Image (spheres, helix red, strand yellow):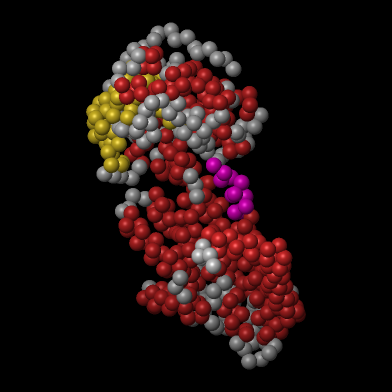
């Protein structure tokens, strides 16, 4: 018997996999993909079917009610849109600034390394923990109470690590030669950053930021902890208002004992998915347009 | 394209830049040792030498681009028109406006061709449309790119070929009217035809510009330069008129290098 050879082993493995790929494996992978897509579509169709009675403008622009048939999703929808905007405004500017500093700033390399290590840790913390932190810091210590502002601050804090990480990625993908070229023409470092690097990185930054924010605003857990689960009969008109939002509203309706509320929950899920889908498509569109720009 | 270099009416013999006793480091590693040399006004100075000999570092010290490299530092004196370029009264952006640079790899900005040429002007507040149009046309004509791009000034510079991009980068540098041009292996990523174009441009530009070109191509140094400097391991080995340098080098290691018998 010949001695075992790793070279030969790999060669055989590759031949075996290639053979499988020609026949069964490719088919299997394709089948699995189709199954997953079909399952998702089936679930979506089921939600549509359950919620179809409520998928109308009355539901979309109606206010909450104790009677399931009269309850509308408007306060929750507006709450979600308010939060989307506020979280963007609260997490994007500081996130971008920190990312720029970490990429271009003159801080000690070790400190930067420590910060980025912490960032990836923070990005992995369960959302409930952020909710508890938000409750204690914003609602209680800063005395903001349970309002849109404390919710937005909590979610912004939660989005910040991913926002920073995606911004850093986008900035890093802009070749350094670009900035050198601008500086060699007499631009100050800030001018080079502002007029060349950031515009080039902007689509990447925006698409990453939008993905992370839309994910965060889809979270119910942190805001349940913050105290947002309640019957809210009006849409917020200022950032200090009490509020509800789609995920919390869905949770609230699906927790009701009367089965009449199930269609409401299903219809709200469809609306939430719609918003998220629009956001993701927009982000994808931006990213694809960006790809054409960054061949250097 | 006109292959004839412009006639120089008054060959100036002054020194535009003088480098004296310059040492440079990246972190703890020293890359330039006690280097002194003069760069002649309105002439082409070629700096040749094996990879890692400090050619590019020397070039990047002349427009203080190395200020941006973390851990890079230098001692010694670099003077331009008699003034210490590292002096406290020197505005570094102004210095870089007067000392243009073309990089090894074409690095046009992702904007339009027009935006590329006008960037250096716009950041100085020169935004008058007629002035910009005039300057764009003039500099693009200067690098013989005008006829190729005059109908698509608004289209992206990244759609140009490598050779066109490099000429655009040259036009971009010329637009702010520098007196010195630093070129870091400007033709190393180009094909022979585009290389020849760049070399012709160098010969034309030296009428009004002091040019320093870093190259590892000795034929290129021979064709384009008036003065050639040979650097090895961060030290200046030889500096002479190009004709003398290649026909009658003094140092044995220069001789070895230009004849290809060089051992690192």
Q: Please tell me which residue lies in front, A47 or B143.
A: B143
Q: Is residue A94 left or right of residue A4?
A: left
Residue at image point 71% right, 62% down? A22
Residue at image point 40% right, 39% down? A188
Q: Residue furthest bottom?
A: A257
Q: Main secondary structure of the magenta part?
A: helix
Q: What is the x, y in percent for residue A42?
A: 73, 76
Residue at image point 54% right, 74% down? A219
Q: Decide: is B49 above or below A59.
A: above
Q: Is residue B25 left or right of residue A143?
A: left
Q: What is the x, y in percent for residue B216?
A: 43, 28
Answer whether residue A281 is visible to the viewer in this image.
Answer: yes
Q: Decide: is B63 above or below A253.
A: above
Answer whether residue B41 is visible to the viewer in this image.
Answer: no
Q: What is the x, y in percent for residue A17?
A: 63, 64
Q: Quadrant of residue B31?
A: top left
Q: Which residues are magenta?
A: A286-296
Quadrant position of the C terminus of chain B in the picture: top left
Residue A292 in the magenta stretch? The answer is yes
Q: Please tell me which residue lies in front, A166 or B153.
A: A166
């Amino acid at each position: 018997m010949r001695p075992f050879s790793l070279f030969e082993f790999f060669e055989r493995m590759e031949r075996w996999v290639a053979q499988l790929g020609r026949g069964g494996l490719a088919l299997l992978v394709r089948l699995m993909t189709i199954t997953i897509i079909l399952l998702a579509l089936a679930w979506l169709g089921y939600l549509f079917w359950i919620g179809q009675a409520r998928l109308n403008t009355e539901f979309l622009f109606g206010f909450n009610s104790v009677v399931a048939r009269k309850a509308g999703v408007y306060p929750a929808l507006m709450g979600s849109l308010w939060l989307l905007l506020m979280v963007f405004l609260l997490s994007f500017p500081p996130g971008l600034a920190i990312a720029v500093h970490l990429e271009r700033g003159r801080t000690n390399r070790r400190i930067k390394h420590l910060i980025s290590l912490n960032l990836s840790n923070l990005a992995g913390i369960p959302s409930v923990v952020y909710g508890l932190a938000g409750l204690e810091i914003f609602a209680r210590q800063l005395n903001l109470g349970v309002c849109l502002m404390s919710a937005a601050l909590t979610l912004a804090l939660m989005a910040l690590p991913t926002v920073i990480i995606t911004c850093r990625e986008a900035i890093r993908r802009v070749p350094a030669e670009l900035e050198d070229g601008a500086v060699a023409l007499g631009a100050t470092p800030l001018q080079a950053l502002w007029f060349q690097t950031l515009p080039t990185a902007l689509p990447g930054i925006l698409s990453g930021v939008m993905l992370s924010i839309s994910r965060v605003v889809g979270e119910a857990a942190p805001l349940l902890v913050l105290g947002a689960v309640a019957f809210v009969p009006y849409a917020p008109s200022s950032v200090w208002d009490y509020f509800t939002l789609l995920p919390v509203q869905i949770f609230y309706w699906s927790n009701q004992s009367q089965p009449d509320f199930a269609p409401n929950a299903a219809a709200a899920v469809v609306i939430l998915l719609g918003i998220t889908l629009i956001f993701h498509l927009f982000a994808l569109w931006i990213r694809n347009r960006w790809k054409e720009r960054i061949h250097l | 394209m006109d292959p004839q270099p412009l006639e120089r009416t008054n060959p100036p013999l002054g020194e535009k830049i003088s480098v004296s006793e310059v040492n440079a480091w990246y972190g703890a590693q020293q890359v330039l040792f006690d280097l002194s040399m003069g760069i002649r006004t309105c002439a082409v100075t070629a700096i040749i030498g094996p990879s890692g000999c400090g050619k590019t570092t020397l070039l990047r010290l002349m427009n203080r681009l190395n200020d941006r490299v973390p851990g890079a530092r230098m001692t010694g004196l670099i003077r331009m028109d008699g003034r210490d370029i590292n002096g406290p009264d020197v505005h570094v952006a102004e210095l870089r406006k007067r000392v243009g640079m073309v990089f090894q790899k074409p690095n046009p900005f992702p904007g339009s061709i027009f935006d590329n040429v006008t960037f250096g002007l716009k950041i100085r507040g020169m935004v008058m449309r007629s002035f910009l149009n005039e300057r764009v046309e003039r500099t693009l004509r200067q690098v013989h790119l005008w006829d190729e791009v005059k109908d698509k000034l608004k289209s992206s510079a990244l759609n140009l070929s490598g050779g066109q991009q490099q000429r655009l980068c040259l036009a971009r540098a010329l637009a702010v009217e520098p007196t010195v041009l630093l070129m870091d292996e400007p033709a190393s990523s180009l094909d022979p035809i585009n290389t020849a174009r760049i070399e012709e441009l160098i010969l034309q530009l030296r009428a009004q510009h002091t040019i320093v070109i870093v190259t590892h191509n000795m034929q290129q140094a021979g064709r384009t330069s008036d003065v050639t400097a040979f650097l090895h391991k961060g030290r200046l080995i030889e500096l002479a008129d190009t004709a003398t340098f290649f026909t009658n080098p003094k140092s044995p290691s220069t001789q070895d290098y230009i004849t290809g018998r060089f051992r690192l």
